[in-house]
Amino acid sequence: MSRILIVEPIAIIAEDLAASIRAWDPDAEILTAAAPEAGVHLLSAGAKVDMAFLHLRPESFADTALAGLLATSNAVCVFMGHSVNRDRDARVLSLDFTFSDTSVADVLTLVLPKKRKCA
């Protein structure tokens, strides 16, 4: 069973992403947070995750408390939204907001067997 954190301030996007994840892995445990601080709260209780979908800028994420907790989990980070510059951040895993079950499944299939660390 996979444990996945979603940090997304827009509830409908978080819900749609959770549904796409469950379409790929019905047994996945999904933790959702509207802000990075809420994600820190979830993980500071000792919860470990395999993967995190983050509506955050990669360049401002590295020095956050959430980044440290995800690194402790060896979680893979996937950055979402328009804040990811795909040309500049080519090494960063990303997911567009126009995601589908298929595009989410592609990311999950790529990540979960290999377990790459957050950048």
Image (spheres, rainbow, N blue to C red):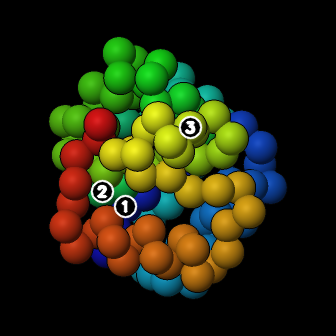
Rendered residue at 63%/34% (across/down): 83
Which residue type does callout 3 highlight? Asn
113 lies above or below 80: below
**For this rendering, which residue is in front, 91 or 68?**
91
Towards the viewer: 4 or 57: 57
Q: Is residue 36 rendered to the left or right of residue 81?
A: left
Q: Residue at (62%, 79%) from the top-left corner?
A: 101
Q: Earlier in the sequence, mark 2 or mark 1?
A: 1
x and y percent of residue 7 in the render?
A: 57, 41
| Marker disc for residue 50 | 2
Q: Dot 2, how many residues are within 10 Å of its Cα: few (below 14), some (14-19), or many (20+)?
A: many
Whole-angstrom CA distance, mark 2 to mark 3, is 24 Å
Label 2–label 3 contact, CB within 8 A: no
Q: Secondary structure at mark 2?
A: loop
Q: Nearer the viewer, mark 2 or mark 1?
A: 2
User: Which residue is rendered at x = 56% and y = 32% of the image?
Assistant: 56
Q: How far from the left and from the top, in percent, is residue 108? A: 41, 71
Q: Are marks 2 and 1 in contact (CB under 8 Å)?
A: yes
As helix, strand or loop, the secondary structure at mark 3 comes to loop
Q: Which residue is mark 3?
A: 85
Q: Residue at x 22, y 46 (%)?
A: 117
Q: Which residue is mark 1?
A: 3
Q: Position of residue 102 (x, y in %)?
A: 58, 82
